[in-house]
Amino acid sequence: MLTPPAAIEALLFASGEPLDKKQLRTLLGLKESELKVALKVLSESLNGRGITLIEADSKIEMRTVPEASALVKKLRENELSRDLGKASMETLAVIAYETGTTRGEIDWVRGVNSSASLRTLLMRGLIEGREDENDKRRIRYSLTTEALAYLGISSSSDLPRHAELAAAARDIIKEDPI
Amino acid sequence: MLTPPAAIEALLFASGEPLDKKQLRTLLGLKESELKVALKVLSESLNGRGITLIEADSKIEMRTVPEASALVKKLRENELSRDLGKASMETLAVIAYETGTTRGEIDWVRGVNSSASLRTLLMRGLIEGREDENDKRRIRYSLTTEALAYLGISSSSDLPRHAELAAAARDIIKEDPI
Amino acid sequence: AYQGPFELLLDLIETRKLLVNDLALANITEDFIAHVRAQDAFPVEDTANFIQIAATLLLIKSKSLIPDIALTDEETADVDDLRRRLEAYEKVREASRELARIYGKSQMFSTGERIPEVTFAPSNDLSADALAEALARVLAAREIVEELPETRVKPLVTIEEMMDQLAKRVQSVMTLSFKEFSKSNKEKIEVIVSFLALLELVKQGAVAAEQYTSHGDIRISHTNSISVPRYV
């Protein structure tokens, strides 16, 4: 019989793309709390293995573990990560530590126009933009599982000095009335 | 640290097709007997999991477990029957009006990453990819004949406002700095 | 490479091992303006930013030269805003360096691209019109983003124009804030004169550079020290 964690693993492997939690729940007929438990069991059972889960926003994806990076690169040289310029890396950093931030906030804190860097990050699939619920015209950006994969971490809470840098970003950027 | 079973799991997971045992041995620097042991450990650890190893004449492949096939089928059907949605529709539109376009050009015109949409459109038989004659690695996409028939046109030049929209798309593609 | 104003400010402060505070900002005012002057031209959309920051720096400078100068509420807000944004940017730069350290180092790969079995499965939202609308929407969305780089191509603001704007901006503010000083003791007026001379120096610096090259007779000391020129 297929346990929920095994079912999730099969779906993530077959899909090859990040799956939305809502999608997983409908496919498996699970309540939110049940999915949460199943995901926890699956991710624990993956400890010490060659593959692991990455979670960004409400999306889950299965990827090889960071430790296997050099090995897998031998298999897949074409997909090597091209470097990111300083401006794009700075823009990625603002979005990483201040998820759901807007272009206005990014320009405010960087002191320069960030539209070119945002376009680079969007085209590489490292960030995605979503319309602000109460203000359609405003786009809020967040990291994708692809970005976490390039950073070699499973979720944004694993970002270096996450608590410290995220807190700093929150109280400074958020005050700015856009 | 990455144990041999975990390393094999990562390689099989990331490889698009079955891997030859000899290839695994060279990639991992293992003797035949060591590989045998590692494979045994890995396949035992996969008991009760959603994925499993399939071995056929010295080639190993990772697959979803048989018990999950109904679920995987549901996932496929779900992916095939869903509405295209904004991202895939825009990707398909760029391909329709700019036949033989590449992924890089589509990303440039749309300003976002289109690989997930391309995968869906390929899977749904709406587009097909052909290698660029002078650059094997570059794939050029165009509508399939079934898609043209479904749209009720014999060639993409019959699409509404074709001259105007195709010209506008081409101008943008010309600006692409890459 | 082109540096944004905050990047430049932080570099100037960091090279002098200072903390981000008003004293540091006052100290590097001349360097910031000298750096701005050294650029031959500026992308239009960044010029306003540089001028605003240069003007705020001169406000902080004037506060350091004349401690009990009364800045207007708006000026104080500008000073606080600059400091807050700089502190935030300092954190962003730290975060960016942290990410750069790990980016691409231990990449996690997705499952290999299995060739998806193809089944022809069009969708009910697919039609020729839907494609035309979708492409039109994409092209329209690009218009808004597009027009920004265009302005970069427009004639750039030359340094002289920028210095004039800056000088006018600060002088009008200065005269406003100096109103009550004119009556008080001589020593304060001496400082005010030297400060306005600094401004003149900066403005002339841009002009004298040309004269210097063509006639070669006017000598002006370099601005990185606050040695105020003696006008005979």
Image (spheres, coloured by chain):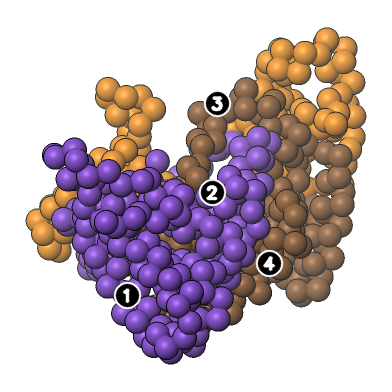
Chain colours: A brown, B orange, C purple
Give the CA distance from mark 4 to mark 2: 20 Å
Give the CA distance from mark 1 to mark 4: 36 Å
Residue to which mark 1 is pinned: C171
Which quadrant of the view contains residue A51?
top right
Which chain is mark 3 on?
Answer: A
| Kind of residue indicated by mark 1 | Gln
Give residue C31's position: percent from left, percent from top: 45, 51
Labelled disc at residue A77: 3
Which quadrant of the view contains residue B30?
top right
Q: Residue at x 70, y 61 (%)?
A: A165
| Kind of residue indicated by mark 2 | Asp
Please identify the quadrant where the C terminus of chain B is shown.
top left
> Do badges 1 and 2 share one subunit?
yes
Give the CA distance from mark 1 to mark 2: 28 Å
Give the CA distance from mark 3 to mark 2: 37 Å
> Do badges 3 and 4 share one subunit?
yes
Looking at the image, tell me whether mark 1 or mark 2 is earlier in sequence order: 2
Q: Residues within 10 Å of mark 2 (few under 14, many from 20)?
A: few
Q: Residues within 10 Å of mark 3 (few under 14, many from 20)?
A: few
Q: Residue at x 73, y 32 (%)?
A: A68
Labelled disc at residue A127: none
Q: Nearer the viewer, mark 1 or mark 4?
A: 1
Q: Nearer the viewer, mark 1 or mark 2?
A: 1
Which chain is mark 2 on?
Answer: C
Residue to which mark 4 is pinned: A168
Give residue C190's position: percent from left, percent from top: 43, 71
- Mark 1 and mark 2 residues within 8 Å of each other at the beta carbon: no
B16 over A112 or under it: above or below:
above
